[in-house]
Image (tube, grey):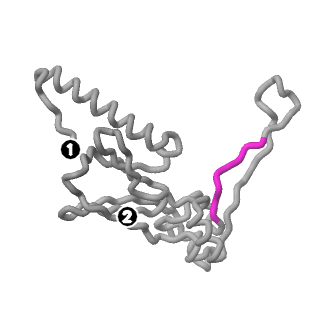
């Protein structure tokens, strides 16, 4: 029996409505007005989120954080110790996210899980696409990106790449050539 799990974020556009469904710590961001505004389209399902924490605790789960004490790496502090903290986790399951697909050890009672603590129910949001707003692009990414970069850095990095590709396209196809990113 496979005991692994996963997170997911899905975006679907039907007519003029954009739907965003999220389970876990993946994230969707939208750049608008040539990168001047960033719209967060999803919520990370982390155990430290107030809504998630309340739901977990009300359903019999708990949140914990491991720590380790190690010798301080700086020779100036020889003989002193340093505390290293791990991510906040959900019990049962020992996961650093509060919503996932799979992860049956966190969910099945026969494996000492609780089906009401770590859940697979997505948050679903929607917005109407209008001509009034200058939409640029949507970024979807996992925690591997957003644990290292904040929203602004992420959108800025994409814009840097778009502008670099635009320059390459203009150089190859003439100064007036325009690369449509939409």
Q: Is 62 included in the stretch rendered in magenta?
A: no
Using the image as rendered, state which of residue 111 and residue 116 is in the foreground: 116
Going 77% across and 26% down the picture, which residue do you hit?
74
Determine whether, in the image, residue 146 is placed left or right of residue 59: left
Tell which circle, 2 or 1, labels the residue nearer the N-terminal end.
2
Main SS of the magenta segment? strand
Residue 131: give x, y in percent of width and height.
Answer: 19, 53
Q: Quadrant of residue 7?
A: bottom left
Find disc 2 in the rendering and name its residue.
21
Res. 108 visible in picture: yes
Q: Residue 21's image quarter?
A: bottom left
Residue at image coords 41%, 62%: 22
Q: Is residue 99 positioned above or below 79 on the image?
A: below
Query: Which span is picked out in magenta?
Result: 83-90
Up the image or down, 61 lies above or below 16; here it is below
| Quarter of the figure with the C terminus | top left
Does residue 112 appear anywhere in the picture? no
Answer left or right for 171 relative to 80: left
Q: Which mark is residue 133?
A: none
Secondary element under disc 1, as helix, strand or loop, is loop
Q: Mark on residue 182? A: 1
Q: Residue 176 location, x and y as percent?
A: 11, 25
Other residues around mark 1 within 10 Å, as few (<14) / some (14–19) / many (≥20) = few
Residue at image x 49%, y 49%? Answer: 143
Which of 150/99 is in front? 150
> Was residue 86 drawn as part of the magenta stretch in this picture?
yes
């Amino acid at each position: 029996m496979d005991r692994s799990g996963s997170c997911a974020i899905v975006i679907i556009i039907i007519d003029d409505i954009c739907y965003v469904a999220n389970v876990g710590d993946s994230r969707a961001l939208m750049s608008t007005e040539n990168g001047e505004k960033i719209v967060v389209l999803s919520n990370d399902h982390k155990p430290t989120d107030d809504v998630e924490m309340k739901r977990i605790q009300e359903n019999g789960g708990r949140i914990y954080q491991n720590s380790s004490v190690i010798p301080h790496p700086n020779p100036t502090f020889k003989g002193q110790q340093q505390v290293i903290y791990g991510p906040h986790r959900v019990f049962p399951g020992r996961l650093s996210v509060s919503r996932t697909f799979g992860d049956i050890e966190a969910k099945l009672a026969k494996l000492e899980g609780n089906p009401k603590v770590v859940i697979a129910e997505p948050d679903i949001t929607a917005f109407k696409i209008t001509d009034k707003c200058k939409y640029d692009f949507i970024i979807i990414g996992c925690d591997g990106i957003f644990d290292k970069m904040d929203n602004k850095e992420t959108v800025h990095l994409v814009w840097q790449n778009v502008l670099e590709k635009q320059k390459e396209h203009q150089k190859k196809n003439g100064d007036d050539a325009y690369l449509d990113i939409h």
